[in-house]
Amino acid sequence: MHESEGTRILVVDDEPNIADLVATALRYEGFDVQTKATGRTAVDAVREWSPQLVVLDVMLPDVDGFAVQERLRRDGRRVPVLFLTARDTVEDRVRGLTLGGDDYLTKPFSIDELVARVRAVLRRTQPEDASRERISYFDLEIDEGTRDVRRAGRRIDLSPTEYVLLRYLLVNARRVMSKAQILDHVWQYDFGGDGRIVETYISYLRKKVDADAVPLIQTVRGVGYVLRHPED
Amino acid sequence: MHESEGTRILVVDDEPNIADLVATALRYEGFDVQTKATGRTAVDAVREWSPQLVVLDVMLPDVDGFAVQERLRRDGRRVPVLFLTARDTVEDRVRGLTLGGDDYLTKPFSIDELVARVRAVLRRTQPEDASRERISYFDLEIDEGTRDVRRAGRRIDLSPTEYVLLRYLLVNARRVMSKAQILDHVWQYDFGGDGRIVETYISYLRKKVDADAVPLIQTVRGVGYVLRHPED
DNA sequence: CGCAACTCTCAGGTTTCTCTCAGAAACGCC
DNA sequence: GGCGTTTCTGAGAGAAACCTGAGAGTTGCG
């Protein structure tokens, strides 16, 4: 029983592929999802459906994302928004959003990053769900809030990609994940290369995480990778 | 009383041999199966018959597999798909599949692998079927989710082929399986060698599974092999 | 601008897996 | 016990999967 059950999320994007991708991923996480393609219909949907969160593309054919937010605010609805923006879009207006409980994500993003942000925003605005901050397995732990990674208490510095990959393995500890699954969840949705990059990043992680301790990152030949203690 | 009873699966492949093979195997597992040879008829069949899963060849004479999925999605049908793809077709367009609960399998595959994937996809999309994750006999157990194999609690590392073979014996525990049956289920359907390879792999398994414990893998001379406790 | 950090590709080296084969061992039958 | 048949298992070739260092291209930042 997901704690996300019953949480309504409205996804607004005019590219059907993106809207679908996001909706599918969030539905799989147990959220109730609706999609809209325009600012106008989005505003209507918020009024009628009262979602707890809106995932909102900044660039829309009619009214732009900020205007949508503005309109909702004037409505008196204080629904938090996770903005999606293209990389080269002005980020000035987007910066500073994190103060109001909102957040943003630049396209292209990875599914896991999106889900993590969604949860983070919900956590901030619906404090009942106070858990899920720390994930740990054996002597390895991650703090979702601060992005702190520790092995046996010692802090480890990870690059963004390394962090998302390790978190994915940690969330699925003891479960073998195929390279295809890892690619789908960790890499940006438009990544075009093949699965060999996963090998490279596993190698990076091993050097940082498994350097002088029991190796937790295991290769399962012909299948994928697992995070698992050797005697577990 | 298979729990798979009443579960409808549509198999779509233009090679009659493959479609037949798959359909027969799934019927034997207790599923309701229909087969179609083209994308067009497949879409119609989904509309009329509403299967819980579609096994779909990517390469079809008329509309290709991805287009079929696209069409179903636009229909608003959220039926999960297990794609079949040729070995050298993989990786390009298959990205993103594991997000929506879909999956893929490269030809040639083994029957047991196919059945395992079908069950995995159904498990993800129809969570009522929460059991069947673990299969066990005596002190030997397999966890399908984590791919864990244990004998008397101790973990055992198996290669992919060893794993599929052991799982086959375990699922059919106490039933003698002929070398021909084992070949048909465990090895890829186009395997050309003879049955002596089964002997080799049984030997590998014995070394790993029956090493220092009551031997569970029994030879039935002139017939085949069984997984069975000596006093059972 | 220049530097540092990061991402991704590639290729050579290494490990592991699959499958074949052949001699040894075990078995069933007479 | 002797004999033909079946099974067992070690050795090894070839293929596949994986690891990792080097380096090119980007991005971000001072």
Image: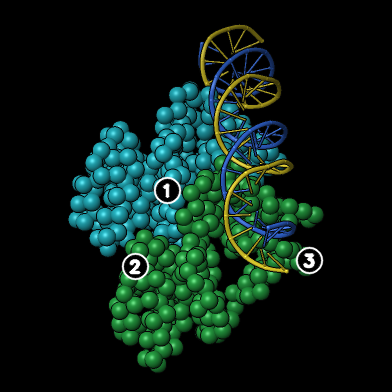
Chain colours: A green, B cyan, C blue, D yellow
Instruction: Indicate whether A232 appears above or below D19.
Output: below
Q: Residues within 10 Å of mark 3 (few under 14, many from 20)?
A: few
Residue A14 marker:
2
C4 or B219, nearer to the observer: C4
Residue B31 image offset from top left, x and y in percent: 32, 50
Residue B43 image offset from top left, x and y in percent: 23, 51
Instruction: Indicate whether A29 appears above or below B187.
Output: below
Mark 1 highlights which residue?
B94
| Residue type (three-letter) at the residue carrying disc 1 | Val
In the picture, measured across the screen, residue B85 lies left or right of residue A98, that is left
Label 2 or label 1, whichever lies nearer to me, is: 2
Rendered residue at 41%/32% (across/down): B189
Mark 3 highlights which residue?
A154
Residue B127 image offset from top left, x and y in percent: 42, 63
**If the image is split into quadrants, where does the C terminus of chain B sit?**
top right
Q: Residues within 10 Å of mark 2 (few under 14, many from 20)?
A: some
B223 or B19, nearer to the observer: B19
- What is the CA distance from the residue labelled 2 to the residue labelled 1? 23 Å
> Mark 1 — on which chain does it sit?
B
B130 or C7, nearer to the observer: C7
The answer to whether any part of residue A180 appears in the image is: yes
Rendered residue at 72%/63% (across/down): A157
Tell me if label 2 and label 1 are in contact, CB under 8 Å: no
The answer to whether any part of residue B155 appears in the image is: no
> Mark 3 — on which chain does it sit?
A
| Residue type (three-letter) at the residue carrying disc 3 | Arg
A11 or A99, nearer to the observer: A99
Discs 3 and 1 share one subunit = no
